Image (cartoon, grey):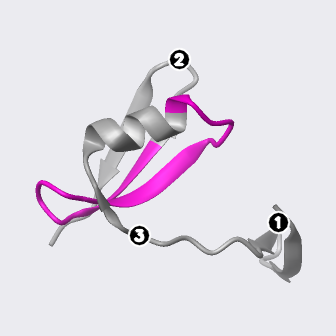
Amino acid sequence: EEEVEGEATGEFEIVRSSEHLVVKPITLEEAADYLTSSEKQFIMFRNASNEKICVLYRREDGNLGLIETEQ
């Protein structure tokens, strides 16, 4: 993952990643399988069961957290 130009906000710099995400429809189980079998910290995806854009992420307690968007 290569970092590209950043943007200063005052307290910190936001560094844009050169990685582009494709938000494709997959199940929550598929997203969890992907995340647990990779070194990634999160996966953004479209939930195949409800079409919501979601983020599944690793929690500090070892579990996975889910953020769903409103439609």
Indicate the position of residue 63 as horizontal and vertical percent values.
45, 21
Tell me if 31 is positioned left or right of 7 in this view: left
Q: Residue at x 40, y 35 (%)?
A: 32
Identify the residue at image location x=53%, y=17%: 62
Residue on which the image places disc 2: 62
Instruction: Residue type at mark 3: give it.
Output: Val
Instruction: Give the number of marks.
Output: 3
Neighbourhood count class around disc 2 (C-alpha, 10 Å): few under 14, some 14–19, many 20 upward = few
52 relative position to 45: left or right: left
Quarter assignment of residue 8: bottom right
SS at mark 3? Answer: loop
Q: Is residue 49 magenta?
A: yes
The residue range painted magenta reads 36-56
Asked whether the beta carbons under mark 3 and mark 2 sit within 8 Å of each other, the answer is: no
Label 3 neighbour load within 10 Å: few <14, some 14-19, many 20+: few
Verify whether residue 16 appears in magenta: no
Who is closer to the viewer here, 62 or 47? 47
Foreground: 6 or 4? 4
Q: What residue is shown at x 15% (from left), y 72% (from top)?
A: 71
Helix or strand or loop: what does disc 1 sit on?
loop
Q: Position of residue 61 (x, y in %)?
A: 52, 16
According to the picture, the residue beneath numbered tag 1 turns out to be 11
* Vertical side of 26 occupied by 2: above or below: below
Which quadrant, please, contains the N terminus?
bottom right
Amino acid type at image mark 1: Glu
Report the residue marked by disc 3: 23
Q: Residue at x 64, y 43 (%)?
A: 40
Q: Do tag 1 and tag 3 residues touch (Cβ < 8 Å)? A: no
In the picture, the disc for residue 25 is none
Question: Type of residue at label 2?
Answer: Gly
Residue 64, compared with residue 3, is above or below; it is: above
Q: Earlier in the sequence, mark 1 or mark 3?
A: 1
